[in-house]
Amino acid sequence: MSSQEDQFQQAVPAPAASSADDGMTWWYKWLCRIAGVIGGVSCALAGLWNCVTINPLNIAAGVWMMLNAFILFLCEAPFCCQFIEFANAVSARADKLRPWQKAAFYCGMAVFPVILSLTLTTLLGNAIAFATGVLYGLSALGKKGDAISYARIQQQQKQADEEKLTGTLEGQAL
């Protein structure tokens, strides 16, 4: 029994470990996840529509978009991929990534089909997936500071500038 419990503990990561250091609020995490799921749906539908053509670049872009949808579902909503054995492990590993890494991955993943075939279908299909990357990128920037701390920093910089200015004027007078 203990070996099964150990395997379960290794397969399921502690949620507090990843959520404590990224600085995202619970509602922003859910917003990013929902955007990822909606982006996956839009990529899948637009990718399927893109494959109904005779242009090979459109077919390649459509296949890539469906692959993007699968990866978005796998990382953001593993419950949609219950039939895949490794879905929870991939989702756990994706949750350990920093927000800027997810942002770079999702944005890069969404730009590639647009480069392959610049059509309205690829642009609209990848827009929400790209927006998911942008949301993760914004969370990587961190929280906005309050006005009091900015005022203190500006006051300290102003004092330092005045001290430098008075130091150079005294040096010229001597």
Image: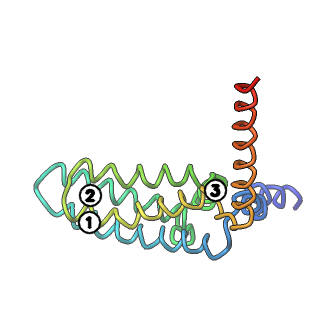
Seen at 22% across and 65% down, the residue is 121
Seen at 54% across and 65% down, the residue is 76
Percent of width and height locating residue 108: 41, 49
View extreme (bottom): residue = 27
Q: Which mark identifies residue 48?
A: 1
State how far apart marks 1 and 2 are (Cα): 6 Å
Q: Which residue is mark 3?
A: 89
View extreme (top): residue = 174
CB under 8 Å between discs 1 and 2: yes
Q: Which mark identifies residue 91?
A: none
Looking at marks 1 and 2 on the same chain, the residue that comes earlier in the sequence is marked by: 1
Q: Which residue is mark 2?
A: 62
Looking at marks 2 and 3 on the same chain, the residue that comes earlier in the sequence is marked by: 2
Mark 1, secondary structure of its residue: helix
Estimate how packed mark 2 is, as few (under 14), some (14 to 19) or many (20 or more) residues with alpha carbons within 10 Å: many
Check disc 3 and give the amino acid type. Answer: Ala
Check disc 2 and give the amino acid type. Answer: Gly
Looking at marks 3 and 1 on the same chain, the residue that comes earlier in the sequence is marked by: 1
Give the number of the mark in front: 2 or 3: 2
Seen at 47% across and 64% down, the residue is 132
Seen at 68% across and 63% down, the residue is 145
Is 24 above or below relative to 97?
below
Estimate how packed mark 1 is, as few (under 14), some (14 to 19) or many (20 or more) residues with alpha carbons within 10 Å: some
Check disc 1 and give the amino acid type. Answer: Leu
Q: Quadrant of the C terminus?
A: top right
